[in-house]
Every structure is written in C-alpha cells, then in structure tokens.
Image (cartoon, rainbow, N blue to C red):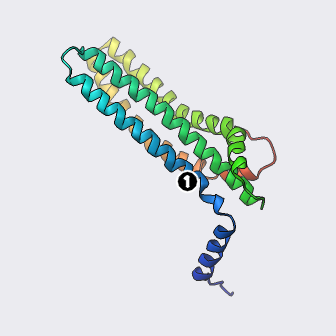
Amino acid sequence: METTKIQYGELLKKSYADFKQNPILFLPLLYGLIFMLIIGSVIIGEYFLYISLSLSLEANMLQIVLLGIIFFIIDFIVFLAGLAIITTMYLGLLAKIVNNKPVSNSDLWQSVKQYMWLYLKIVMLRILIIIVPFIILGIIALLFFLISQTAGLIIGAILFVLFILFLLAAAIFMVFAFLFIPPIVTTNKSQSAI
C-alpha cells in the first residue's frame, strides 16, 4: 500500500497563488476589522460618557446604572448583528468558492440577504438548547424551594451541578453537530431541515 506524502511547500504555494488570483477572500475579514474598530470606538466613548456622568454630583445612582445597562444591551445587539453579517458573508464566500464561481463585493452583500434567516435559525436553536433546560431546572428548584427552603437549596444545588454537566455536554454537541453546517448549507441544493 502506497501512502501519499503531502508536500506542504507546494500546498502553500498553490494557496498563495489562489489568493493572488482572488484577493477578495479577505474582504469579510476587512469588514470585520472595520466593524470592530467602530464598535470599539463607540464603547470607549460610552465609557468616558458613563464615567463623566458618574462623577457629576447631580447624577442619580439609579440613572447611572440604568444608563450602563442600556449601553450594554445596545452594544451587545449591535455586536451580534455585525457578527451575523460577517458570518453570512463567509457563508456566501464559501458557497462561491466551493462551486468555483468568481466572488465580488456585491456577492458578499447578497449572501447576507441569502443566508441571514438560516443563520438566525441556527443561533436560535443553539440558544434554545441552553435556555429550555435552564428554565425547566429553575422551575423545579423553585417549586422545591416553595415547599421547603432546605429541600429547595439541596435540590437547587443538585440541579446546578446537573446543569453544569449539561452545559459541558451541550458544548461538545454544538461543536460537533454544528461544525459541518456551513459546508452543507452552501453546497446542498435541497431544502434545509433547519
């Protein structure tokens, strides 16, 4: 049985030649870096605004905390939206590369429209895998706590350990179950089950 030796030098040369022919491959990364610089600048500006408000004597502590929470929620939503846009650009890029089609800047933005709903469904599925068991275990612990505080604390501690074990199993499941979704989504012509 003859084994094939991989010539890494040749592989790197071919990859570099492919990149030189199609430098648009790094355009989503460039968009991501620009997005991170913008959101980072906004967060730094919010931080200085937050500090200046907290140092003023007229500011109410409740208003300062509420403002911090509002900043955090808005920044988190904007960050997730930017992450979704960059990820769907990569899905479109992968689809074009796998099918040996040329890629343009407009194709990347078109892939955002094409893959956004699918990406959001995958993210919601990941969130539900974590949230639903958390809510169920929390309700069970609360019911036991309402019956007896001691029983509630004991059951709550046991359920907390079980939830941590579940999180570890869910993390492993998500890595392996969702690992091949991008290639499948971008190469499969049939309707997705998701």
- Please name the residue shown 54% across and 49% down the image: 175
The single residue placed furthest to the right in the displayed view is 190
Look at the picture and state if 136 lies above or below 148.
below
Callout 1: helix, strand or loop?
A: helix
Tell me the residue that label 1 is attached to. 29
Please provide percent x and percent y for residue 120.
62, 35
What's the amino acid at mark 1?
Leu
- Please name the residue shown 45% across and 27% down the image: 74
The single residue placed furthest to the bottom in the displayed view is 2
Q: Is residue 83 left or right of residue 19?
A: left
> Looking at this view, is 76 or 184 the one in front?
76
- Asked if residue 181 can be seen in this view, the reply is no
Look at the image and tell me in which quarter the N terminus lies: bottom right
> Looking at this view, is 58 or 141 the one in front?
58
> Looking at this view, is 107 or 81 the one in front?
107
Q: Examine the image and state in which quarter residue 16 appears.
A: bottom right
Mark 1: few/some/many CA within 10 Å (<14, 14-19, 20+): some
Please provide percent x and percent y for residue 119.
63, 39
